[in-house]
Image: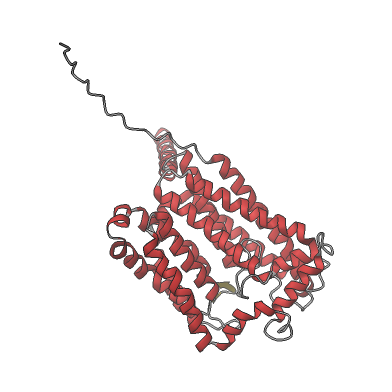
Amino acid sequence: MKIRQPIKQQPDVQAIEPPKKPALPELAVFILFAFMITLFGLIMLYSTSFVTQGSAYFKKQLMWMFIGLFAGAGTVMIGSKRLSDWSPLMILVLDLLLVWALFCKPINGARRWIQVAGLTLQPSELGKVVITLFLAKFLSSRTRALESEPFWKVLVPTGLWVGPTILLVLAGEDLGTTVLLGSLYLLMLFVAGMRLRYILPFALILPPTAFLIIREFDAMRWKRLTVFLDAETYKMTSGYQLWNSLLALGSGGWTGVGFTESRLKLLYLPENHTDFILSIVGEELGFITLLTVIVAYLILVYVGLRISVKARTRQGMLIAFGMSIFIGMQALINIGVITAAFPTKGMPAPMISYGGSNLLACLIAAACVAGVAVDSAIPDYPDKLLAWAGKRLHIGRASGSGEAERSS
């Protein structure tokens, strides 16, 4: 008779996820490409605007670049997480700025800008950064709610916070940024873990509704939305800008007509230093250079998403994802507009187009991604940096007081 041996209890072995490698290589590539794109934008702005404006636009953009670099350095030192924790207050301040812009003098029929002390600020550009920081904070702390009650505990609260900001941007006649912010909102909800059945109704209902409202109540904007389908027919009226953009891209060929040799920038192509600056890039430097710019954007966004994957915290992951995606979406919309793939709508090329607010927002966004990458290598580095600075300051004071005592 066989005696069964008691089955030994196997110890519970829990699979331990291997630690993620720090995103320092990705950080180096990200900073390199962000700097290269920004520098290229300065060079092309000088070429595009020198004939009509001299060096005025170049000097202003250079000033904003230094402001953006200073703000970016401050962002990295403070830390993306801490800025994200402050985002509810930042949204309230942003809403006040957007309301203020509605009462300022309109520019080209839109009320998006605030003019103070000779400087012009566009709050909606900073809204891309602030909304991303807010959603990263809120969604990272609602992991269970995304599974149990996503509608009442996630969609409704975020809608009450973000919805008024998006509506204020729309009230300022900034349809392009409104679409971008709405798309960014839905994408971040999806990446955070919300089921598609809660997101798809917004994606399927809102665009047709917006088109119907524009068609029935805003004939001018409706024409701008549809003229891209046949720019040649309207080349002397509402399609004038788009048609000249296509002429610039076509005349550049593969290698371009030469740096500073653009003909379309001589008062033929409106807004050639802002929304349509890449059209001048195609004319002067050719399709090969324009394709290189597109590849540079793709690499920047890809590396930013790699940093997101390697983030140490869920909040950091959402910050890096949101910032990278908004830069990528803005570049996509701008390139689609100048090539007549999308309806004509004002959307600057990130880090290239003239505009201080756009450059400032993009550099702060890049700094947020860089902060997430640094945190993956040195956890909670802002606190350690603050402690180190306090220690050094304390030592300095202690040594100073000791010397004073010895001298007395």
Would you place residue 277 above or below residue 317 in this image?
Answer: below
User: Which of the colour schemes (rainbow, by chain, secondary structure, one colour) is used?
Assistant: secondary structure
Relative image position of residue 216 (x, y in whole percent): 51, 88
Image check: 359 left or right of 241? Answer: left
Image check: 292 left or right of 119? Answer: right
Question: Total number of numbered labels?
Answer: 0
Q: Is residue 275 visible?
A: no
Query: Closer to the camera, 74 or 83?
Result: 83
Q: Quadrant of the C terminus?
A: top left
> Could you say which quadrant of the image residue 60 lies in?
bottom right
Q: Residue at x 61, y 84 (%)?
A: 223
Q: Is residue 42 visible?
A: yes
> Could you say which quadrant of the image residue 266 lies in?
bottom right
Would you place residue 330 above or below residue 247 in this image?
Answer: above
Q: Quadrant of the N terminus?
A: top left
Query: Closer to the camera, 225 or 350?
Result: 225
Query: Closer to the camera, 127 or 148?
Result: 148
Relative image position of residue 330 (x, y in whole percent): 58, 64
Which residue is outermost to the top?
1
Q: Residue at x 48, y 43 (%)?
A: 310
Q: Residue at x 53, y 46 (%)?
A: 306
Relative image position of residue 39 (x, y in whole percent): 69, 56
Query: Closer to the camera, 364 or 163?
Result: 163
Would you place residue 60 above or below residue 229 in this image?
Answer: above
Relative image position of residue 319 (x, y in whole percent): 46, 54
